[in-house]
Amino acid sequence: MTKASQISPGQLTALLLTSRLAVSMTFAPTLHQVSHGSDYLLSAVLHGFLILLAALPSLWFAKRTDSASPLEYAYILWGKGGAIVAAGYGLACLIYQVMDMVWFSQFFVTTLSPDISRTVLCVTLAAAAYAAAFYGLQAVGRAAALVFFTVALAIVFILIVLLPDMELIHFPPFLYDGTRPVIYGALEELPRTSELVLLGLMLPYIHGGYKSLGKACLGFGIGLTACALIIQITALGVLGDFSGMVLFPYYTAVTAAKASLLQRMDVLATSIWLAALFIKTAFLAMLYLNCVGRLAGAKARPPAAVISIVLVAWLGIWLGDMALQWERQIIWIVSTVLLSLFAVLLPLALIGSDFLRKRNLRCSESSEAQHESIQGHS
Amino acid sequence: MKNGRSISLISFLLFLVVGIVMLPSCREKSQINHRVVVTAIGIDAGEEEGCRLSIQVIEVLKTSGSLTEQEHNATSVYKTEGLSVASALKSFVAASGRNVYILHNKIIALGMDQVKKQSLQSMLDYFIRSHEGRPQVDMAVCRGSAMDLLEVPSESTAVPSEQIAQMLEEGSQWGFVTRARILDVERALSGMYDIGLPIIRVEEEPDDSTSGESDTGNSRKSAHLDGTALFRNGIYAGDLDPEATRGLLFARGDLEQCLYVLELPEDMGGGRVTVSVKNAHTTITVTQKDSTAEFAIQVTCDAEILEEYMPENLGNSQIATVNALLSEAIRQDMNAALETSIGQYGCDVVGLKRLAMKRYPELVRGREEEWPDILKECAYSLSVDARVTKIGVEFDASSIPAL
Amino acid sequence: MWDNVQKRNQEKKISPPKASTPIKGILMDDLVQLRTLFGVSADLTIRRLTVCGYSAAVVSIEGMVDRHIMANAVILPMTGLSGEGQPPEQLMSRIRDEVLGFTDLLQVTTMEELTNLITSGFAAVLMDGVPFAVLGGLQAFMIRGINEPSTEVTVRGSREGFTEAIRVNMSMIRRRMKTPELTFEMLSVGDSSQTAVCLCYMRDRVSASLLNDVRAHLQDCPLDVVLESGYIQPFLENRQRSLFASVDTTERPDTLCGKIAEGRIGVMVDGTPFVLVVPYLFVEHFQSMDDYTQNPIYASFIRIVKYVAFFISILLPGLYVAVGTHHPEMFPPTLLMTFLNSDHSTPFPLIFEAILIHFLFEIMREAGLRFPKSVGHAVSIVGALVIGESAVRAGIIGAPMVIIVALTTLSSFVLPTLYGPITILRFIFIVLGGVLGLYGVVLGTVLFLCSICAMNVDSIPYLAPISPFSLKAMRDVFIRADWRILGRRRFLVQNVVGSKIPDDQDNPNRKKN
């Protein structure tokens, strides 16, 4: 990516939202057993607020460094130590891709038609996403804007179609089990918001600097909350407490929808979800290849892409066949580590390191000036 | 330029892989015409602990290309047995060489014998878990065997299950039955409330027509709606008769319209009035009473006089009497529904526990399992405000012959 | 693109400029040189004459000049000239200034210029002792008359279309845009053909950087012969191996006027009525002259119909194959029965059926184009027999597939400029739908979306103003706003959202709005 390929704050918001909706639409609160039902509605609101809080370190970093990338800044401050940061970011992007592929593979096995080859679909998804990554940030950003619009339209359409099947009685009372499920639910969801980790890598490629980033984050938080509420209201309104007993409550609710000629809308929902997942994977692939390019040069990107396609697809299918519960716990731990490291600690460490460097510089300048003045007097 | 080469390389590799892997499967792919399209499934008690399935399928060779041009029944009914629903469906594959395709299934009928033996969850678990299961599939309980229902011919549609589905839909709109789908069963299984399934009775009648595939001698089968089967925690508890079913629909606020034939008292000259009830609106208010609750169910509705069979036309004061009679009739139906479902069987088909939970969570929290019994101890007040709003065109009563 | 051009120039060997041969002034030598250049070509006509005692010659190409005018306005006046004793150069100057009655009067000193102009329909006068030639435009070659354009038919609007003669085309533009800002810049492309190319733009609206790019691309065009605008079109496009052209054509002078009024550049090529328009954005494929002459509500409806037709033409067969093969649960029951019946009676999988029938259709379409018109009706009979009732009755293909094909092809005819990309994409989506179902179609769609979003046409996003989105620009994209709204603000292509063309603050001709 070059600085010539900058995107607008609106495109960044669409990119982040599409990427997040790819997870929200298949979110399974039942696996976390932390919050479900009406509590998840409150969790979603709290989650939106926490997103804005968690984005503050990146925003502060952007303001102090005039929207430099933490990746580049690490090279400036730490020299070859910046390679560790690049490797870390690249690994994080790869891990997120594998996580998404695992989830996709599990979804495929449990809900989609077995007539389509899972292996071919996973490989095709990964390969198509990597091919799209080579088109560049602007292409993915512009496509994300259109995909987000379609996805948002689809989830609103599904809500409208399912309104006759919804009843107020299906919504359990708020805070039935106290505030703990709400808080734990939001904290459960926050580390899985991989977009917070990727914000740092996006800093140099947004028009308008940190103010635009702030607007994008605000839009992301509000938009995500709205979409998550619509999705959960749809699932809860249709299924009631049954939504806490199924793996993919939104998908299960959508299977109940039919509109005129469309007898089953779950295929439509799966299709738009796949489109969002494609954008997310392409986004991650693009950032991953950027890190590879920074580490090993631009020529390393195509072979890295081919290797990553195979790796992501294979790991996704292999891990996807395993038991869900412990796997989700491991995923949560890994996500929390990545979020803490790249969204919070790294920007703060870079800011601190920069502050120390500048202070040392000022000290050495002032001592030189003193030395010169003493020499001048003598 | 280099990006373009990368894209081309990846696209070419992808095309190659997909082409090599997938092209053979294009040939070998199981086409839909190699499978049977199931339109109705009946579950009856089988030998020992198993079940006997009847499946109604569309026979492609019997169709003339379009259901709208179909002149005769395009379906056949097959029997198959197995230890479970899934094994019974698969044994059909072994017997016929064709796999089943249940994504267009319209109705699942449960035989009364099977319903009394097994819970709803175990009978329907396959349809809830399978990706081919549809939540909008209608459910019904059959007095007798489910296979009888599937063999009922249809005069109006090429696929008989469509007629049954229409019957259930119209029946629920007119207050004859509750309409239940797999989605409602799923909701009930989560513990929110109990479920009532419509009961269909199959009768054999003398056949005066010349067509019909299920004719046995000179008789033919016909289906009739016959009340509601109540389930408590997914286990069959008992029945509601058609009047109580109507009352249940009023209590739940699910009634769209229904008919009442009211017998007028002698001081009004006797006779009968047929009224159509519309725009029924139900409000349930929950009030906490110690460790139980009091439920006030208030129903308001409009009514239209369809027929007067009496010496004189109804005057204004008599309309008020009709209102009172109608209100009382509705109240009695509701009372019967509540007494039977809650009082007798402990089935919370109205969702009262859920309402109490929303209004007074502390009443329910920690006592969810006890609520079927708690409901029996709760107080209920029923009030109905029915008003006749349309009386139709009036004409000279003297033209009506004397009773 | 400009970087690539520069790189290409650096990489290839720069050939030394061709040496130009001067006109010697010795008539015999010059005529021999001319004859040598033209070889045994029979259309070179040399008329020897004596003017005031000096040998002279009038050289022209037969069939390209008006012989009567040449005789009356050139030869006769020259032969009747008096002025013996004058030096030949002075005599030639007198002939140029007083005798020859041409509106186009040129003077050349090299053989290359002389041959170029003679082959363009000029008549040249050479005289012994004069090291230059005087030429006058006497073009009288037969050209096709101004007819209705064959590819862009409108209900309401001009019935004039461009012709093969570049000068006539220029006059059609000039008649419509009576502003001195309208500029025609002549270039020559093709080493052998020396085809005249005209850049047509408005000085106060065009972007200087865009103009420089176009000019540079044309000047660097390495072709030997240029017979049609399609030859030079790839050199003006930004991206190779792209389905969608960022440079397209028009046959209508009114359409071209509308385009250049938006800051675009028209590239006219002598010998073809198809004028290139640079840049050409995606949304312009859905705009036509009729949109701007009809009621805005109806025009908006037709616009939406076109967009829907676009999606139908590329996605419908793929969706049908996907749903029929992998997701038949999406069919309503009555449609399912029709589908089952047709699927039962045909031997091939849906994907093969779809590819076969669309391929057959393309064969017939191509046959209909190439076959002489007199027997063209036979193609439609064969087509009806092959694809119509007979194929269905024989059980080779299903009836629903025939309907799908019919609907798809009708939809693609709504957008003739996109016919090529639509056809390719359609086949791709059929394969994707057959292999991966609806998920394959979705993946293909999103990848196609990324591909088209990645296209930039001379630093202008190809998909603008859809993405990057501009609400104000939507007044002429999915709908066509009333002219009272459209006329409020001038639209310039370089100002579209996402454009990276630098603001031409230093353009002296740029007027502030």
Image: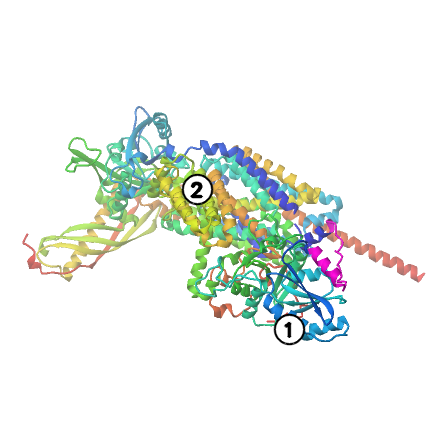
Q: Is residue C18 magenta?
A: yes
The circle drawn on residue C357 is 2
The circle drawn on residue B252 is none
**Chain at numbered mark 2:** C
Left or right of B280 on screen, residue C221: right
**Chain at numbered mark 1:** C
Distance CA(mark 2)–CA(mark 1) = 64 Å
Q: Is residue B302 magenta?
A: no
Mark 2 crowd level (few <14, some 14–19, many ≥20, 10 Å Cα): some
Tell me where residue B101 appears, x and y as whole percent.
37, 35
Compared with C237, C429 (above or below) is above
Taking the spot 68% from the left edge, 75% from the top edge, the residue there is: C98
Tag 2: amino acid: Ile
Q: Earlier in the sequence, mark 2 or mark 1?
A: 1
Residue furthest to the right = A378
Q: Which residues are magenta?
A: C10-37
Marker count (numbered): 2
Taking the spot 24% from the left edge, 41% from the top edge, the residue there is: B227
Q: SS class of the residue under badge 1?
A: loop
The circle drawn on residue C101 is 1
Compared with B30, C69 (above or below) is below
Residue furthest to the top = B48
Residue A177 visible in rendering: no
Tell me where residue C180 appears, x and y as whole percent.
61, 72
Left or right of B223 on screen, residue C41: right
Taking the spot 25% from the left edge, 35% from the top edge, the residue there is: B149
Scheme by which the image is coloured: rainbow
Tell me where residue C80 appears, x and y as whole percent.
67, 74
Left or right of C110 on screen, residue C218: left
